[in-house]
Image: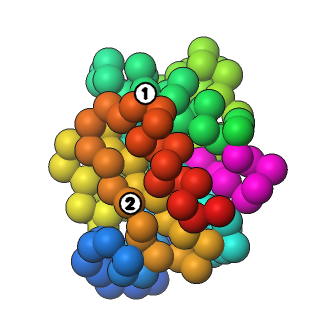
Amino acid sequence: MLAALLLVACDEAPRQAGRNASAPEIAALNLDGRPVRLADYAGKVLIINFWLGGCAACVQELPVIEAVHREHRDRGVVVLAVNVGGNADMARQLAAERGNGFENAVDELSLTATRYEVGVFPTVVVVDRAGRLRARMVGQIPKATLEAKVAALL
């Protein structure tokens, strides 16, 4: 599995993750151990939730993300929750406990977090249907804020 992740990580040099820039490639594995790629979400509005194990604010924010996802998934909104520096077992356990309906991935080597310039947890970024970064929200976010950012892209 680590070899697959390293192959994905080497596909592309890191880019600046500024607003309206092309979103950097994702270098993480889903909970089945398969690489997750940005192309998997082409044509969708993608909410990427970067979280850290042991982060209370990260766990408290999950219902907000789930609610926005549930409200807009029929309009092409998807969520990828990326656990940074942890492992698949921890991410799998949290997903089972919370019953979230979105994809989960693990960024064990923090490659994706580095590409997206994540330094504080939780951090949420929103990628538009064309693969451009459109919003970055650091810290626990209110539902209305995330809702507004997503709605502007539908």
Q: Which residue is mark 1?
A: 61
* Residue occupying the far bottom of the picture: 12
Residue 139: percent from the left, percent from the top? 26, 36
Instruction: From the viewer's side, name the closer residue of 104 and 134.
Output: 134
87 vs 100, left or right, is: left
Residue 44: percent from the left, percent from the top? 67, 65
Residue 140, placed above or below residue 138: above
Residue 20, placed above or below residue 149: below
Mark 1: amino acid = Glu
Residue 76: percent from the left, percent from the top? 73, 58
- Identity of the residue drawn at 60% across and 32% down: 66
Instruction: From the viewer's side, name the closer residue of 91 and 98.
Output: 98
- Identity of the residue drawn at 54% across and 69% down: 128
Which image quadrant: the N terminus?
bottom right
Is residue 105 visible in this depiction of the protein? Answer: no
* Residue occupying the far left of the picture: 119
Q: Is residue 123 magenta?
A: no
Residue 67: percent from the left, percent from the top? 62, 31
Mark 2 or mark 1: name the one nearer the start of the chain: 1
Residue 131, placed above or below residue 84: below
Q: Choose mark 2 or mark 1, whichever is in front.
A: 2
Other-residue count near label 1 (Cα within 10 Å), few / some / many at <14 / 14–19 / ≥20: some
Q: From which residue to which does the magenta span run?
A: 72-79
Distance from disc 2 to disc 1, alpha carbons, whole Å, reads 17 Å
Mark 2: amino acid = Ala
Badge 1 element: helix
Which numbered marker is on residue 135? 2
Which image quadrant: the C terminus?
bottom right
Residue 83: quadrant of the picture: top left
